[in-house]
Amino acid sequence: MARKRKIPVRKHHGIRDPLKQMEEKEKRLKNVVNNPPEKGNDQKPSYKFSQFKKLSDDAKAGKKFKRTYRGVEDKPSGSTKHKEINKFKNIKQLPGEDDADYLRRVNRMTSESLKEAQYEAKYGVRVIRNTKTGEIAIEKKPPNEIDELLKQKQKKHVRDGRINKKFSMRNRKIFDPEVVKKLVKQALQENEEEKIRDVQEYKKDIVKFGEVVHAPPTISALPRKAQKNMTVPRPGSKNNLLLKQILNGHEVNLAGKNVSSKSTGIFQQKSESSKHQLKGRRRDLPATTRNMLESEQQRMICLYRDLKKSKASKPCGN
């Protein structure tokens, strides 16, 4: 007899003594169970509650909060660039100054500030004007990293003191912004039209309840520069079929052999019988009943003909 497979039992590696287990459990819960507060009903608040209480107290005291916006965390705390001070923040009218003189002074100061800004941008310097004495000093701006990288890139494309035409800025083709805008708009419109066309191809016909269709739709459209006989052959379009000529009652020569009038007569009888089936009361009957009546009628006709032939073949007794 085969031995049964031994099912492995879960191994217990911990302490098996229940008294020792209880002792270990009590040690873990020593500061939780049966631990009354030291000061009356005092209970230590959680960290989240203490943070919330601190925020509410600061708001009541009117303390301003320093907000850190997204993307500002990695920026240096101290500003590396020189802070631009608005020189003409408040241009007030002096006491005893006419309106015309005041406007003239404002116009002069604004024109001077514009010229200074153009000069600073052109030569890469900063103009420092002393408001009390009127002295003008020039200080060189710290180099811009992006401008330095562009200059180094342009120097690489200079060969023997000549700028390479491939990388020259002058030879770059500049497009009219209006033309570019029109082209982009046209491309977007074409893309949308193509999407709509793709969606319409997979649309299904919605057939209403009770709608009856007697035949599939006829495709009247033809390929370009093509006639009906050049396209795919359509059913019923061939006039040289054997069946059509038999139904019409004509004799057909097939591969040099004449089809006998007997075969045509059979087809004619069948066609006539099918015509008789759709006349009178028979057209309201089902197809199987009509076929049964037709076959019974044909059998009776054959029996009558045989009877007539047998009577004609017998010699007369007189």
Image (cartoon, helix red, strand yellow):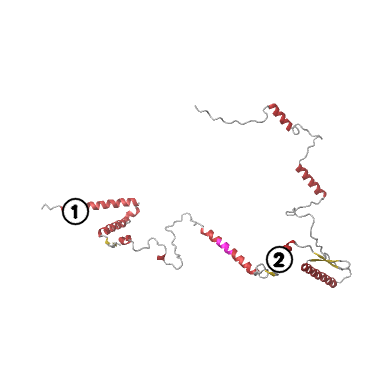
* Residue found at the very far front of the displayed protein: 160
The location of residue 152, given as percent across then percent down, is 72, 64
**113 is higher (above) or lower (below) than 308:** below
Picture quadrant where residue 258 is located:
bottom left
Q: Could you tell me residue 36's position as x and y percent?
A: 78, 33
Residue under label 1: 309
Principal secondary structure, stretch drawn in magenta: helix
Residue at (33% x, 50% y) in the render? 289
- The three-letter code of the residue at mark 2 reads Lys
Q: Nearer the viewer, mark 1 or mark 2?
A: 2
Looking at the rendering, which quadrant does residue 69 occupy?
A: bottom right
Q: Is residue 271 magenta?
A: no
Q: Left or right? Give the position of 220 relative to 311.
A: right
Is mark 1 in CB contact (under 8 Å) with mark 2? no
* Residue 6 placement: quadrant: top right
Give the residue at x 55% y 60%: 196
Classify mark 2: residues with Cα within 10 Å, few (<14), some (14-19) or many (20+).
few
SS type, badge 2: helix
Type of amino acid at the residue the image marks with label 1: Lys
Q: Which of the labelled discs sits on residue 35, or is there none?
A: none
In the rendered structure, which disc, 1 or 2, sits on the residue that comes first in sequence?
A: 2
Which of the pair 186/20 is nearer the observer? Answer: 20
Q: Position of residue 235 (x, y in %)?
A: 39, 60
x and y, in percent, of residue 62 in the image: 82, 50
Q: Secondary structure at mark 1?
A: helix
Segment tinted magenta in the rendering:
189-194
Q: Is residue 173 left or right of residue 111?
A: left
Residue appearing at x 55%, y 62% in the figure: 194
Q: Nearer the viewer, residue 57 or 277?
A: 57
Residue at 85 percent of width and 72 percent of height: 101
Residue that badge 2 annotates: 155
